[in-house]
Amino acid sequence: MKRQRKERLKSGILIFLAFLCMVQIGILWNQTQGFPFNFLLEAIFADNGIDHVNVEQVKDNYFHPENITIMTDRFSQWVLNEQHFAYHVIWDDIRQNYLPILCQSKPRRIYPASMWSELMDISSIRIDFAVKYPNSMLLWFAGIKSASPSFNGIRGIIIVPQENVNITVNTLYVYDESSVYMYHAEIRDNMRPKAYYSGLANEMRNQSGIEPMSAIGEAFPDFADPAHEDIPIYAMDPDVTQSMQILSARIPGSLILDPESDDLESIQESILLTQKDSLLAMRDKTENIVVFSDLENVYQLNAYGVLEYKYLPPEQKTDPGDAKSSFVQALSFIELRKDLVGDAEIVLKDIRQEGNAFVFTFGYRYGGMDILLSDADNDMTAPAIRIKASSDRILECRWVIREFRGNPGYRTYSVSFIDMLDRINENHPSLLWFEKFRSIRMGYHLIITDISDKRLYPSWLIITDKASYRVPVGEMED
């Protein structure tokens, strides 16, 4: 009996030691991404990098409207962005209270997509998103584990408080680019009262810091492209102004490729993170690029501050893609390196499915205004970040990395539409005669191939039916 117990004890110790050896060998092999049982180590020690990011804590930074518009009609509309207090009050109420109701209830009616443009003519509160958020992401943002919304994603929401006489019910319309869904939402104690939404237009009229805008198709129909959505402009007041900052933009110091130096440590720490010691570095000083790679991963950084990543093994997954899980991968990749971009926000601009993966496009924003990028192939439409991700990992990434800082102090600029027309006439007179406006926005513009430190000034960023233009905004004299 004693001998049998000793043998069992020896066997147990040997098995335990063998397991420890496997783990130790696996850790060493995993640093070079070549261990054939990689999945075992990931299950024990990691979660594809996601364990480094609290996605629940940061997810709301990537879910917000591009604009919230208080409308009485096409001639009187107040466009709010993140700089306005009312924007946050309205959005908090929508996100925390109305979104769960919309996701978990049935619509009263379903209308064709053409109904959406008809709603522009009535007094309402309009919430516009830059992208159509898929249902799986909406449920995650709303904190709902399981539901089957009637709509296929949300591109926009309109609140029409006067449509229902019941003071405890608000009428909402949801747009998913295919249909319009009408909901009646009961107003609970923790929600903004109906009177708040009914009184927003009067509140805007009484505020000195925001001016009403008009639809360009109504105020100046000869300039509008009827095939595209109407553009809000400051048409009536020639003296309307706005305080804005000048931005500085540069390639982060830790990512500058010095042709005279072989030191890559700061680059490895900034973009490779925990993989910095496990990837082979190759430097091409002629092209001024650096490549880090192993059997599964390739990172490339060029002199323009453009980071590219590719996962080499072919994707094995055949299940339908899940937008939320793929987005978590993209969000984690960005958040781990977000400090590189300085004071700029990173905002989601596009989502589309590609096979079993999803492609997410992100842009930069500062002070509520977009920073548009241009390269050889895209005139003011180049993405700042483009990530292709499956529910398991990042598959591809291209990231134009810039560090943005707001210069101290604000300057006052004219944002009148009349002033903009005068400046267009000075610089691009043919535009007013032969082209139609499709998009007019205030923002900043950066050329990717310009690697020097730049000062970015507020500009009119204009897209017509034929070209794109950057027109400087007129600075007011002191």
Image (cartoon, rainbow, N blue to C red):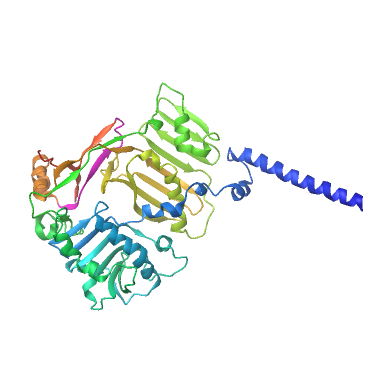
Along the viewing direction, whichever of 339 and 175 lies nearer the viewer: 339
Residue found at the very far front of the displayed protein: 189
Q: Is residue 441 magenta?
A: yes
Q: Position of residue 299 (x, y in %)?
A: 46, 38
Q: Position of residue 176 (x, y in %)?
A: 32, 65
Q: Position of residue 169 (x, y in %)?
A: 29, 75
Residue 264 lies, with reference to residue 331, above or below; the image says: above
Q: Quadrant of residue 198?
A: bottom left
Q: Position of residue 267 (x, y in %)?
A: 44, 32
Along the viewing direction, whichever of 177 and 251 lies nearer the viewer: 251
In the image, 456: left or right of 435?
right
Which residue sits at x=55%, y=35%? 278
Residue found at the very far top of the displayed protein: 260
Query: Would residue 433 be visible to someone looking at this image?
Result: no
- Residue bounds of the magenta highlight: 436-452
Residue 16 lies, with reference to residue 456, above or below; the image says: below
Q: Is residue 388 magenta?
A: no
Which quadrant of the rendered structure holds the C terminus?
top left
Magenta span: predominant SS is: strand
Residue 339 lies, with reference to residue 198, above or below; the image says: above
